[in-house]
Image: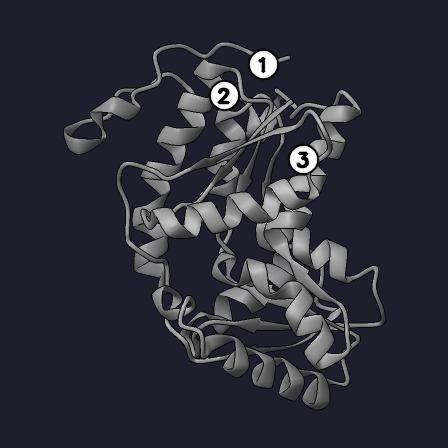
């Protein structure tokens, strides 16, 4: 089984961090391929960043299809381009926020989300609504650390404080980490805060792995059928759809 963990931003160090989180939980025989797109923002911290990350992500989904990947993880907490990626792929495509919310909902009566910057809190709320997780998502908080500064050794202490404050404020039973750049902090934060801490990259990897193991593929009909044949112009010319082959 080959699972591609696609980091929609172009920072290779973050791709490797996400790939390591996926490999830590993958079953023997599952190959994890960390993928950094050739184009896109260095980090994703706004709607603008997210929109401009999608073409690079979709190019990697198309390449994965040509090269026989079995499934994909979108390693960004905004789950950018998830619906479009599902249109292109035969196998399962899982967003890390989607998987993290589902996993955390099994761990208690409710969870808090701790993300990087306050400007991304609204997106986390929107995704909780999209995935039917309003009942479980008790609050969204931020550590106010830019994504590319999460590697700073002092960042983990700030994030731990934010997680501790979130648990106290929301009376939550678990924490969901709202950024792929925090993927390596779960064990540390669980010890520091005293509640389960969920990384969406690991959760999404196991979801993809389970679906592929069960022989389940994306439905090839309706909304998530392959996009209709269509030409694109300018910088998007390479995204032209040549045919409408049906995925079974």
Q: Residue at x 83, y 59 (%)?
A: 106
Mark 3 touching mark 2, by CB under 8 A?
A: no
Marks 1/3: CA–CA distance: 18 Å
**Nearer-N-terminus badge (2/1):** 2
Give the residue number, with chain letter if any, for mark 3: 208
Residue at disc 1, secondary structure: loop
The quadrant the C terminus occupies is top right
Q: Residues within 10 Å of mark 2 (few under 14, many from 20)?
A: many
Residue at disc 2, secondary structure: loop
Marks 2/1: CA–CA distance: 7 Å
**Nearer-N-terminus badge (3/2):** 3
* Residue 92 vs residue 149, the one in the foreground: 149
Looking at the image, residue 109 lies above or below residue 203? below
In the figure, is residue 46 to the left or right of 207? Answer: left
Mark 2 touching mark 1, by CB under 8 A?
A: yes
Looking at the image, residue 241 lies above or below residue 153? above
Give the residue number, with chain letter if any, for mark 2: 226
Give the residue number, with chain letter if any, for mark 1: 247
């Amino acid at each position: 089984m080959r699972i591609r963990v696609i980091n929609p931003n172009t920072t290779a160090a973050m791709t490797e961090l996400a790939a390591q989180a996926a490999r830590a939980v993958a079953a023997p025989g599952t190959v994890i391929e960390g993928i950094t797109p050739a184009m896109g923002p260095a980090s994703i911290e706004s709607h603008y960043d997210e929109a401009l990350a999608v073409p690079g992500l979709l190019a990697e989904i198309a390449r994965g299809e040509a090269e026989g990947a079995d499934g994909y993880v979108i390693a960004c907490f905004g789950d950018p381009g998830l619906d479009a990626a599902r249109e292109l792929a035969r196998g399962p495509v899982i967003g890390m926020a989607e998987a993290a919310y589902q996993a955390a909902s099994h761990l208690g009566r409710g969870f808090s989300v701790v993300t990087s910057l306050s400007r991304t809190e609204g997106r986390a709320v929107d995704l909780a609504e999209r995935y039917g997780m309003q009942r479980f998502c008790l609050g969204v908080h931020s550590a106010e650390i830019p994504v590319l500064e999460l590697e700073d050794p002092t960042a983990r202490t700030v994030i731990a404080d934010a997680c501790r404050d979130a648990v106290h404020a929301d009376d939550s039973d678990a924490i969901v980490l709202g950024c792929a750049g925090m993927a390596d902090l779960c064990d540390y934060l669980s010890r520091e805060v005293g509640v389960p801490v969920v990384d969406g990259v690991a959760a999404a990897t196991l979801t993809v792995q389970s679906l592929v193991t069960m022989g389940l593929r994306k439905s090839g009909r309706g909304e998530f059928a392959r996009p209709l044949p269509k030409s694109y112009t300018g910088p998007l010319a390479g995204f032209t759809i040549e045919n409408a082959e049906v995925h079974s």
